Amino acid sequence: MKLIELIDAYKIYNEGFENEVRALNGVSLTIEKGEFVSIVGQSGSGKSTLMNILGCLDVPTYGEYFLNGQDVSVMTDAELSKIRSRDVGFIFQGFNLISTLTAYENVELALIYQGVRASQRHDRVMEALERVGLADRAKNRPSQLSGGQQQRVAIARALVTNPSVIMADEPTGALDSKTGQQILDLLKSLNDEGATVILITHNMDLACASHRIIRLSDGKIVEDYRLRGVTA
């Protein structure tokens, strides 16, 4: 089932001027529900711009983007915000946890933004923490957790809203290799359970854990190949 369809997308800065930059230069791609896709490329290749568009943080200058059949490319900022809170779970290299909140409260915040009633939040938060193996650390603040545990909280926060897609932007970049592998294994496990995962990375070793690799250069897709089939 088609989840994402990007059609001839351009993202152009300073268009028409001498310093024009085409961060995306005619990109088209389709991602099916249940895929685990890696988007790779060197700095300046356009992968962060592509992530921002796929994650509904931005819209293309030209072209179309459909997420779950909805044309996201024509939405207002308010509409994009609503789509993000409902359909996209983000995992970042720097964890992006609020230091004054507990693990439970950091995860709960995603449901608060989504407008879920307090009476319905507790079970969903604890279920998400259980899925990442941190139910017993619900009352701990980020400073009381290791880097790997903080990233697991961030993954629980991404999961708790039951998003259509999980966007993981260099999720192991701030971790040692052993802990990074544990986080990658967790993403693979979530994908095995049916989650659609898009991994943005410059690390080909990480990318090879996915089903499919899309490589960007100068704002264009230069390679798109499958390593294994969809498991969902």
Image (cartoon, rainbow, N blue to C red):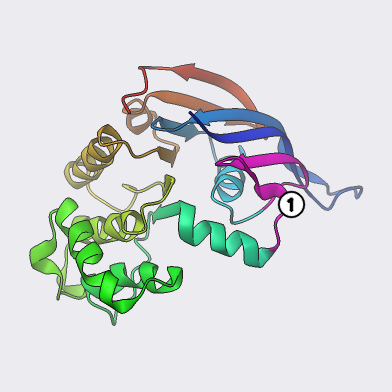
Looking at the figure, which quarter contains the C terminus?
top left
Going by the numbered disc 1, the residue's amino acid type is Val
Residue 13 placed where, x, y %?
Answer: 78, 51
Residue position for label 1: 74
Residue 192 picture quarter: top left
Asked if residue 142 is positioned above or below residue 10 in the image, the reply reads: below
Asked if residue 92 is positioned above or below residue 143 in the image, the reply reads: above
Spot the residue most to the bottom. Answer: 100
Looking at the rendering, the stretch of residues picked out in magenta corresponds to 59-76
Q: Estimate how packed mark 1 is, as few (under 14), some (14 to 19) or many (20 or more) residues with alpha carbons within 10 Å.
A: some
Q: Is residue 142 visible?
A: no
In the image, taking residue 8 as reference, residue 183 lies left or right, namely left
Residue 44 placed where, x, y %?
Answer: 61, 42
In the image, taking residue 129 as reference, residue 110 lies left or right, namely right
60 inside magenta stretch: yes
- Out of 215 and 17, give the one closest to the viewer: 215
Please tell me which residue is depicted at 28% across the width and 70% down the height of the picture. 120
- Out of 88 and 225, give the one closest to the viewer: 88
Please tell me which residue is depicted at 31% across the width and 36% down the height of the picture. 194
Residue 23 picture quarter: top right
